[in-house]
Image (cartoon, rainbow, N blue to C red):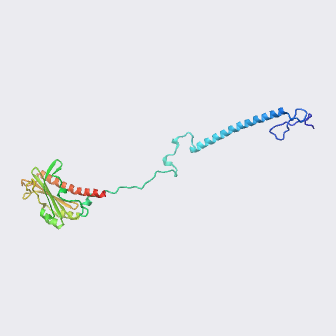
Amino acid sequence: MSYGQGGPQSQWDPWKPQSQQPWSSGADDGTPDWAALAEASETRNKRRRLLFIGGGALAVIAVGTAVAMAVVSANGGGDPEAGPSSLPASGTLPNGSPTAPSFAPTSAPPPLDPKDFISSAKKDTAPLSAGTLFPGTRLTMGDAVYKKGATADTKSCATAAGGTLPKVLTANGCTRLIRATYSNGGIAVTVGVAVFDTEAQATKAKAQTDDRSIVRSLSGKGVKPFCDGAFCRSTRNAYGRYAYFTISGFTSGKDVAKKDTKVFRTGDDLAEFAFRQIHRRGEVQASAAAGR
């Protein structure tokens, strides 16, 4: 059967490699049908452009989907629009999360105890005299102002004591007895500080005293003799390596009675002042040691 003379002709499809190409509309004279070829080429180009446009759209959609999936993944799989409120609480952070650095606890050394420095002669090395214990010319305690009179400092403790005190001081190794007198309104008081090498000696000495253990009154520098034969009021105590005593009475020589509260207050004020001055020695030396 001839393909060019009225027999069935194969329909040419440019996308089917085995289809028959139409070289002529009628007789087969060997000359290509250029119009048909041009039309077929145009058809192929149109299909190719459509495929490119369609493929590009699919690619854009695929990229957009990948980005969206990446955003969702970065947000932990939750709502992409979720903000910081969606983050887990600090108590639920994973174990691998960074934590605040920790430091070993530190503490400042405890302050030095002032009493340690006045409890033994080895540590209590600050200058000691009537001037350091009883400075100035006046003493104010509350609303009372006392004028300082004579002072004395002796290494023979027994000579500055009376009653049963000389024996007590000697037996316990007293090394010095420093005295000072203060007066106000016809009342005078002598305060005496006995010095020992150790706190144990001072404590023992104080424990051995009684109501007849007195420090001798000291007159002079505007203070008349007092408590030479009259009844006077006395106190005794100890702190650190020091024992301190007072004797107070009237400069007129009158006996002290229980109703004479001003005499009692004068003795108490000077006993308190002696204690403060001894403690102050410890504070000064403790502060100096802490600064070294």
The residue positioned 84% from the left and 33% from the top of the image is 34
Q: Is residue 76 above or below residue 170?
A: above
The residue positioned 26% from the left and 60% from the top of the image is 117
173 horizontally vs 54: left or right: left
Residue 62: quarter of image:
top right
Quarter of the picture containing the C terminus is bottom left
Image location of residue 106, percent across then percent down: 38, 55
Work out whether residue 289 or residue 70 is closer to the camera in this orientation and state it.
Answer: 289
Q: Can residue 202 be seen in this view?
A: yes
> Tag count in the figure?
0
Find the residue positioned furthest to the bottom.
Answer: 171
Q: In this view, does 21 lie above or below 156?
A: above
Image location of residue 234, percent across then percent down: 13, 57
Q: Can residue 162 be seen in this view?
A: no
Image location of residue 143, percent across then percent down: 16, 47
Residue 130: quarter of image:
bottom left
Q: In this view, does 82 lie above or below 107?
A: above
Work out whether residue 31 or residue 121 is closer to the camera in this orientation and state it.
Answer: 31
210 horizontally vs 54: left or right: left
